[in-house]
Amino acid sequence: MERHEIVENIRAALAEVLMRDFGPLAEGTRLFEDMHLDSTAILELLMALEDNIGIEVDPENLDMDDFRTVGTLTDFLERARKVSS
C-alpha cells in the first residue's frame, strides 16, 4: 500500500469517527489541535484503520507522538503494516 493510500484511509476513518466529510488532508494536519480528537476518538480511529488497512494495534504500545499529525500517524501505520506482514 502506497503512502498516499494510507493517508486516504486515515481521511476516510476520520470522516467515519467524526461523522463529517473532509477534503484532502495534508500530512501536517494536527490530529488533536486541528481535528479536535480526544483519546476516545483516537481509539475509534485506530479500530477503523485496523479494519481498513488490515493491521492489529496493541493500545498498550501506543506512543502519543505517533498521533501528532496525519504524517506521524501515517509513519506509524507504515511501521505497523511491516510488522503485521
Image (tube, rainbow, N blue to C red):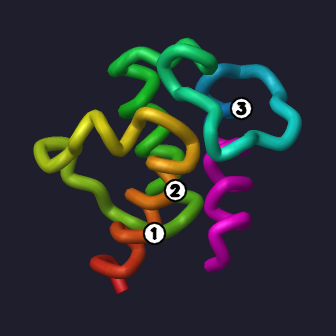
Towards the viewer: 64 or 56:
64
Q: Which callout, 1 or 3, points to the residue nearer the camera?
A: 1
Residue 47, how many percent across, how many down? 43, 44
Image quadrant holding the C terminus, namely bottom left
Q: Is residue 80 above or below residue 60?
A: below
Q: Is residue 30 left or right of residue 67?
A: right
Residue 51, how many percent across, how many down? 51, 57
Instruction: Check residue 6 for magenta coloring.
Output: yes
Q: Secondary structure at mark 1?
A: helix
Q: Secondary structure at mark 2?
A: helix
Q: CA distance from mark 2 to mark 1?
A: 6 Å
Q: Which residue is mark 1?
A: 78
Towards the viewer: 64 or 53:
64
Q: Which callout, 3 or 2, points to the residue nearer the camera?
A: 2
Name the residue type under label 1: Glu
CB atoms at circles 1 and 3 under 8 Å apart?
A: no
Q: Which residue is mark 2?
A: 74
CB atoms at circles 2 and 1 under 8 Å apart?
A: yes
Towards the viewer: 45 or 36:
36
Image quadrant holding the N terminus, namely bottom right
Name the residue type under label 3: Ala
Residue at image position (53%, 14%) is 33
Residue at image position (12%, 43%) is 60
Q: Is residue 27 left or right of residue 32?
A: right
Residue at image position (64%, 69%) is 3
Q: Which residues lie in the magenta part?
A: 1-13
Residue 9, how many percent across, how many down? 66, 54
Q: Which residue is mark 3?
A: 15
Instruction: Check residue 41 for magenta coloring.
Output: no
Residue 74, how many percent across, how many down? 52, 56
Which of the 4 image quadrants contains residue 64? top left
